[in-house]
Image: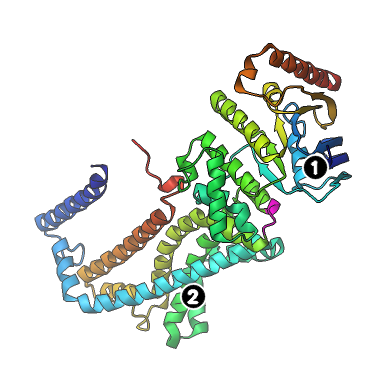
Amino acid sequence: MRSALKYALPLALGFAVLVAWEAFVRAYDIPRFVLPAPSDIWQALIADFPSLLSSLWTTLRITLVAFALAVLCGVALAVLFSQSRVVEMMLYPYAVALQVTPVVAIAPLIIIWVGFERINLALLILAWIVAFFPILSNTTLGLRSTDHNLIDLFRLYGASRWQILWRLKLPSALPYLLGGMKTSGGLALIGTVVAEYGAGSGTATGLAWRIIEAGNRLQIPRMFAAFFLLTAVGLAIFFGLSLLEYLSLRKWHESAVSKEK
Amino acid sequence: MNVIAALCAVERIYSNGVKAVGPLDLEIRDGEFVSLLGPSGCGKSTALRLIAGLLEPTAGTIVWPGEKARIGFVFQDPTLMPWATARDNVRLPLDLSHVQRNEADKRATGALARVGLSGFEAAYPRELSGGMKMRVSIARALAGRPKLLLMDEPFAALDEMTRQELNDDLISLWRDDSLTIVFVTHSVYESTYLSTRTVVLTPRPGRVAAEIRFSRSPAPDPSYRFTPEFGNETNRVTSALRNAMKDAA
């Protein structure tokens, strides 16, 4: 009952909003280039589906690769930090600097450096910069939050550094890493889209470019269709990662354990 | 009986300048059940960690006349890995010393059976009660086949009935395995019930204030709790503890 409501309620709300939207646009005869009706957006989506889909694929591919690299590098650097205080003290401020620099501001620079002929690589780097930090900071926190008594126990039984890392610190950090991944997955998408905006002109072929293009041509229903695809991708990433989190933690972590009633 | 470990004028000063113990002199003999009794913050736990080698003394030495004993350690909290089943937790000391998996599983299952947890091998810590988690923790210490078992207020957080049960079970384990146990507690009753000898420590920095040997403890059976003799013994310990506190004040 509870779980049925969990899906039914937001769906019902969404449906109600769409119906109200459609009625509002028709009743007041709002021009399509100001606010298209859901039915117009749907038509645009169907009509442009092949080109939108190929743009979606471009954006999604960059997002997923940037995200995967962010997880890999974030975890690797966090592990390095946990093994060496000196490295952490040296590098951490720069990791923060990377995070606080607005991606829009550095996008042109990165694109010039990498070159317009390799625009996807430039977008990948920009999305990676945005997605990387939550992984690093969450995993670092997780590795540090390991139960000190357990570390003592491992030492007492003569565990090597490697055994302490692999058998104790990494599993302890897993819930933190998964939390960071949920933030970072959404950021990777945002990073890709913002970088596409930054790249601007006809070089980029992702969804952001479709939005700019449709905006310039006042094809507002098409613009909305692209918005919805982006939102759908964002939701899919979030729920996919939530599922991964649930599957990894359901047996032992408080956050994923359902309460007995 | 042979001395297996001796603390000679051991001191430990923490980096913030607080002196937690010392100078502390203490001998642990083969097969003893020693309680370290003292008020909170008197450095009992520090003393235990010094024996375990988890802390280095800032002065004095710890001597192991024979080979250094194999140590098992039980903390006040069960200190289990929440992502691992009871059996996997108990197997930890064996895994870390690369005991073969089949053999390790067999020994872990055996250790769980000894603490009364047969059938709970596949349970995760969050599925177990506080007392059961503590039993897993004890099973883990036993799985490493220790000569010397160090216990840091292991039952302090449990309810009274569970605590009494675990006290009786611990005495059986001590007898059956001819273990040597050093048991830190702040409970006069627990120390009297369990140990062959209680060492009363002063408030911080912990030093030996008194030593009490018992003629009948560890309790021969659970009804010992209700005998006048047990009452007398606890009175002896109580007054020793009182004196230790008074001298310090």
> In this orientation, does residue A127 appear?
no
Residue designated by label 2: A125
Q: Which region of the structure is painted magenta? A: A155-159
Element on which disc 2 rests: helix
Subunit that carries the residue with mark 2: A
Q: Amino acid at mark 1?
A: Tyr
Looking at the rendered structure, whether the residues under marks 1 and 2 are on a common chain is answered as: no
Q: How many marks?
A: 2
**Identity of the residue furthest to the bottom in this view:** A117
Q: Residues within 10 Å of mark 2 (few under 14, many from 20)?
A: many
Q: Position of residue A109 (x, y in %)?
A: 52, 78
Kindly report which numbered mark, 1 or 2, lies closer to the viewer in this rendering.
1
The residues tagged by marks 1 and 2 sit, at their Cα atoms, a distance apart of: 47 Å
Predominant SS of the magenta segment: loop
Element on which disc 1 rests: loop
- A112 versus B9 height, above or below: below
Q: Is residue B52 left or right of residue A122?
A: right
The quadrant holding residue A61 is bottom left
Q: Position of residue A42 (x, y in %)?
A: 16, 67
- B246 versus B165 height, above or below: above
Taking the magenta stretch, the answer to whether it contains residue A156 is yes
Q: Nearer the viewer, residue B239 or B196?
A: B196
Residue under the image location 56 percent in, 40 percent down: B114
Residue designated by label 1: B14
Q: Amino acid at mark 2?
A: Ile
The N terminus of chain A lies in quadrant: top left
Q: Position of residue A189 (x, y in %)?
A: 39, 67
Q: Residues within 10 Å of mark 1 (few under 14, many from 20)?
A: few
